[in-house]
Image (cartoon, helix red, strand yellow):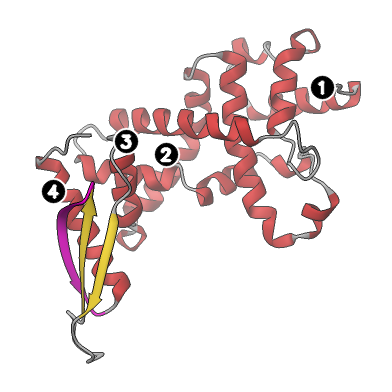
Amino acid sequence: MKISNHRVEEIINFIKGLKLDQKFQKEFTKEKIKNILYINESLTHSSANNEINYENLEFLGDAVLRLIASDFIKNKYPFMQVGERSELRSHLVSDQWLEEVGKKIEIKNVLVVGNKALRDKSANATIQAEATEALIGALYESLTIVEPIKDWLIPFWEEKSKEVLADPHKKNYKSALQELTQSKGLSIPIYKTIEIDKKHDNPERFFCNVYVKNRSIAEGSGKSMKQAEKNAASKALKYFENNVIDQ
């Protein structure tokens, strides 16, 4: 993939702005063009280049992000229950969080995006989130270790963790349960919800059963379908604190 001198300088300056540890900063110079190309790929949307774009690095970045987020939570909150860790991690690897990081590092200033995608304002947030995740993948490809990436992300995680833990309404039990089952190599949870009463004021109007690997794990009720599923997911997280399901 050809890259102009101007683009190389642009990427080098962008990486400097991330404020990685100095000993890793030197891995992104004109002499280390392979690493520059990884970063450039992570900043290229498919609308600009259908063959070389950030999709593969985004996939890698997702795996790296989950791994180091888990390590951060384990070290930062050693007494947290497994379900609570999964719940917190769902926020620390979410598209919303990735978009927030993308905005803070001003990733949009170095993105290569085709005209069609540029005109689609509704896609801006998604592109920033995806590119930020791809950037994490590119940093790993370049450095081949996770420590400098983790050190870079810790301030963002600490800020988000405080925000989530201070506000119980931010709890997303369904996302947390999916995070937990995926980390254990299990299938995605399936929610089967039925309406058992037509009365809108009934706090148990809906009943939900959540299944993992075709096995009923927990039940929950609520005045709405969403509430019933949330309650079932919450109970399922507690189930996994004391039980194991084989892969």
- 73, 58: nearer the viewer: 58
Residue found 37% across the figure and 30% down from its top: 72
Instruction: Say whether residue 172 is left or right of residue 202.
Output: right
Coordinates of residue 21 in the picture (x, y in percent): 58, 17
> In 3D space, how far apart are the residues under numbered discs 3 and 4 (Cα atoms)?
16 Å
First in sequence: mark 3 vs mark 2 = 2
Distance from label 2 to label 4 (Cα)? 28 Å
Task: Provide the secondary structure element on which disc 2 rests.
Answer: helix
Q: Is the Cβ of the residue at disc 3 closer than 8 Å to that at disc 1? A: no
> Can you name the residue that lies furthest to the left here?
242
Residue 170 belongs to magenta span:
no
Amino acid type indicated by mark 3: Ser
Disc 4 designates what residue? 239
As drawn, is 138 to the left or to the right of 45? left
- 152 and 108: which is toward the camera: 108
Residue carrying label 2: 158
**SS for tag 3?**
helix
In the picture of the structure, the residue carrying the numbered disc 3 is 183
Read off the residue under disc 1: 1
Range shown magenta: 213-223
Closer to viewer: mark 2 or mark 4: 4
